[in-house]
Image: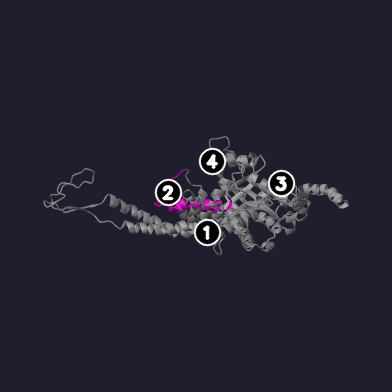
C-alpha cells in the first residue's frame, strides 16, 4: 500500500500534468472572457495568483452586447431549470409499485421539503453560487459546484468553483469521477480550516504577524478509492478518497472520504475527445469579435462625422479655421458667396449600423436573449401562454437544459441528500422503501419539464372538452362514457406535480362517495316523507268509502 508521501508525490505529478495539458484551452478561455466576462480575464493563467484585486479588465471592449447577453442567458437557464421561490423537482421511488404506497410517497414529500428548506437557507448560499455557475456555463462552457456540510451547524454549503482552479477526469463511461482543485488560503484561514498543529512550518510562522493574510496554495484531490474496505465505517470504507495537500511544502494535511462525489459539474456542449465543455460564447466568438471591431470603426467614423476634418484652398488668404461654436472663419467664402471650406467626406454610417445589427442578432440568438424577451416583456401573458411559447422555443433550450439536469442537477441532488442523511436530518425510511434499497429518482418540476409533461395533460383536457361538446350538441351522454375520471384525475395530479398530501387516498375517496350516497338516500327519504304521510292519511278514508 502506498505511503502518504507517495500519495502526495503521485497526486502532485498528476495535477501538474493536467494543468500543463490544459494550456491551449486556458488560452482560448482567456480570449473569450476578455469579451464576455472580463472579471474572469487573467484567472486562467497562474491560477490567478498574480492578479491584482479590483484591476480594470474591460479596456479592449467597445461593444457591450455580449456582456449584456451573458447575464440574460444565465437568467433564462435559472428560470427554466431552477427558478427561485418554487420547488423545481420532486422525489419518487425508483420501483413503480412503491409509488402507490402512501407511506413511501409521504416520505418522499418530506425529504423533498427538507432538502429545499436547507438548500434555500441563507447560510447555504445556493442561489448566489448557482447564478455564478450559469454565468460560467455561458462564458466558459463548464460550471463546477462543490457541495458539503455546513460547518458548526446542520445544513448544506455551496461553493461555485472557478474553472481556472479545478481539473477533472472521466471514467471509462464518460462520468466525471475525479477532481483536483488548486486554491488559495491565507495563513489565518488555513489555521481555521486544518488546525494549527498540522500546518507546514513556513505557514505557522506567519500566524499572529502582519503577514498572516499572505496567500498560500493548497490542493484538494478527490479520487475513486481503489483500496475501499466495505467492512469499515470510516473514510476508508467510502468510495471516494479526499486529500488536502500543502502545495509548496508538498505535505499531506488531511485525508478523508466521501460517499458521493462532492463536485457537481455541468457542461454546455462537449467536443469529441474533450473532457471540458464548450460554451455559447465560444460558438459566438467570431460574431463578438467582429462586432467589437465594427463598433471601434464606427466610433472613429462617428467622431469624424460630428467633428469633421476641414478642407481648405491654400491661397495664403484664408485665416485659421475654427470649429468652435460661434466662431468666425474669415475668408471662408469668396466674393460670390461660394464656400471655400469643405468637410472631408466620411464613410456610410448607415451601412455600418446594419452590419453591426447583423452581428447583434447572431449574438442574441446564441445567448437565448429572444427567449428571455418572451418570458419578461409580455407580462400580460398567462402561465399557459408562457408555457406554449417556451415549448415553441424548446429546440433552443432542450439540448442545454437536458444536459444540465443529467450532469449537473442530478449529481448535486444525490450529494445533497447524502449530506443531509449523514447529519440525521432526513426522517426514517418506511420499511418498504428500506427493503428496496432506498432507491429513488428525481422528477423535475421546472418550467421546461412542465412544458414537456403538460402535453399529456393538455391533450386530455382538449379531448374531454371535445367529448363534452359532442355530448351536449348531440343530446347523447354516451360520448362521455369513454372518459375515465377515476384514472385521469390522479394521473393529472402526478403530471402537474401536486404534493401527495393534497390528494385524497383511494380509501378516503370511496368513503366520501359512500357518505354522499347515504346522504342522498336520506335526503330522498326526507323529500318523500310528506307524500308518504299524505298517502297514509288518505288510507282510512279510502277504506271507509269501500266499506260504505
Upstream in the sequence, badge 3 or badge 1?
Answer: 1
Question: Between residues 395 and 517, which one lies in front from this camera angle?
Answer: 517
The residue indicated by pointer 3 is 426
Mark 3 or mark 4: name the one nearer the start of the chain. 4
Q: Position of residue 273 (x, y in %)?
A: 56, 64
Name the disc covering residue 236, or none.
Answer: none
The secondary structure type at the circle numbered 2 is loop
| Location of mark 4 (residue) | 214
Residue hosting label 1: 278
Residue located farthest toward the front when viewing the structure as drawn: 548
Mark in front: 1 vs 4: 1
Quadrant, the N terminus: bottom right
Residue 22 lies in the magenta-colored region: no
The mark nearer the N terminus, 1 or 4, is 4
The reply to whether callout 3 and callout 4 are in contact (CB within 8 Å) is: no
Q: Is residue 11 visible?
A: no
User: Which percent across, then down, holds residue 42?
Assistant: 47, 50
Residues in magenta, as a range:
54-82
Q: CA distance from mark 3 to mark 1?
A: 38 Å
How many residues crowd mark 3 within 10 Å: few (<14), some (14–19), many (20+)? some
* Magenta stretch contains residue 66: yes
Q: Are marks 3 and 1 in contact (CB under 8 Å)?
A: no
Q: Tell me which numbered mark, 4 or 2, is placed earlier along the sequence.
A: 2
Amino acid at each position: 500500500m502506498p505511503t502518504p508521501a507517495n500519495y502526495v508525490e503521485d497526486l502532485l505529478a498528476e495535477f501538474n500534468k493536467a494543468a500543463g495539458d490544459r494550456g491551449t484551452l486556458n488560452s482560448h478561455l482567456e480570449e473569450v472572457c476578455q469579451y464576455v466576462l472580463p472579471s474572469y480575464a487573467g484567472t486562467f493563467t497562474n491560477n490567478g495568483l498574480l492578479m491584482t484585486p479590483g484591476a480594470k479588465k474591460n479596456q479592449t471592449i467597445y461593444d457591450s452586447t455580449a456582456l449584456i447577453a451573458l447575464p440574460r442567458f444565465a437568467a433564462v437557464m435559472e428560470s427554466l431549470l431552477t427558478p427561485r421561490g418554487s420547488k423545481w423537482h420532486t422525489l419518487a421511488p425508483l420501483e413503480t409499485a412503491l409509488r402507490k404506497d402512501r407511506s413511501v410517497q409521504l416520505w418522499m414529500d418530506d425529504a423533498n421539503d427538507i432538502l429545499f428548506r436547507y438548500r434555500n437557507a441563507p447560510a447555504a448560499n445556493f442561489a448566489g453560487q448557482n447564478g455564478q455557475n450559469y454565468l460560467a456555463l455561458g462564458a466558459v462552457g463548464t460550471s463546477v459546484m462543490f457541495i458539503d456540510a455546513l460547518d458548526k451547524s446542520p445544513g448544506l454549503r455551496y461553493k461555485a468553483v472557478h474553472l481556472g482552479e479545478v481539473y477533472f477526469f472521466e471514467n471509462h463511461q464518460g462520468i466525471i469521477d475525479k477532481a483536483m482543485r488548486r486554491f488559495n488560503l491565507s495563513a489565518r484561514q488555513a489555521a481555521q480550516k486544518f488546525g494549527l498543529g498540522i500546518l507546514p512550518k513556513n505557514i505557522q510562522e506567519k500566524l499572529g504577524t502582519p503577514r498572516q493574510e499572505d496567500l498560500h496554495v493548497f490542493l484538494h484531490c478527490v479520487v475513486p478509492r481503489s483500496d475501499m474496505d466495505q467492512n469499515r465505517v470510516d473514510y476508508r470504507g467510502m468510495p471516494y478518497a479526499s486529500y488536502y495537500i500543502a502545495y509548496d511544502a508538498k505535505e499531506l494535511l488531511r485525508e478523508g472520504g466521501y460517499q458521493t462525489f462532492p463536485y457537481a459539474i455541468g457542461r454546455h456542449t462537449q467536443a469529441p475527445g474533450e473532457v471540458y465543455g464548450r460554451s455559447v460564447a465560444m460558438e459566438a466568438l467570431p460574431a463578438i469579435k467582429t462586432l467589437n471591431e465594427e463598433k471601434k470603426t464606427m466610433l472613429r467614423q462617428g467622431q469624424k462625422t460630428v467633428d469633421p476634418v476641414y478642407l481648405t484652398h491654400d491661397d495664403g488668404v484664408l485665416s485659421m479655421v475654427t470649429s468652435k461654436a460661434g466662431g468666425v472663419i474669415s475668408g471662408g467664402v469668396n466674393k460670390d458667396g461660394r464656400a471655400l471650406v469643405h468637410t472631408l467626406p466620411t464613410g456610410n454610417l448607415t451601412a455600418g449600423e446594419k452590419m453591426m445589427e447583423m452581428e447583434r442578432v447572431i449574438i442574441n440568438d446564441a445567448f437565448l436573449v429572444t427567449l428571455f424577451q418572451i418570458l419578461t416583456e409580455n407580462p400580460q401573458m398567462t402561465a399557459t401562454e408562457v408555457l406554449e411559447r417556451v415549448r415553441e422555443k424548446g429546440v433552443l433550450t432542450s439540448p442545454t437544459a437536458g444536459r444540465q439536469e443529467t450532469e449537473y442537477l442530478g449529481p448535486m441532488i444525490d450529494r445533497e441528500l447524502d449530506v443531509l442523511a449523514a447529519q440525521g436530518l432526513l426522517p426514517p425510511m418506511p420499511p418498504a422503501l428500506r427493503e428496496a434499497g432506498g432507491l429513488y429518482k428525481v422528477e423535475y418540476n421546472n418550467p421546461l419539464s412542465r412544458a414537456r409533461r403538460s402535453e399529456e395533460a393538455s391533450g386530455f383536457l382538449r379531448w374531454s372538452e371535445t367529448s363534452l361538446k359532442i355530448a351536449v350538441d348531440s343530446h347523447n351522454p354516451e360520448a362521455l362514457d369513454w372518459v375515465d375520471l377515476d384514472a385521469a384525475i390522479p394521473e393529472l395530479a402526478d403530471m402537474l406535480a401536486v404534493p401527495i398530501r393534497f390528494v385524497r387516498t383511494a380509501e378516503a375517496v370511496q368513503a366520501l362517495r359512500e357518505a354522499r350516497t347515504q346522504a342522498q338516500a336520506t335526503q330522498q327519504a326526507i323529500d318523500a316523507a310528506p307524500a308518504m304521510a299524505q298517502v297514509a292519511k288518505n288510507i282510512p278514508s279510502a277504506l271507509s268509502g269501500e266499506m260504505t
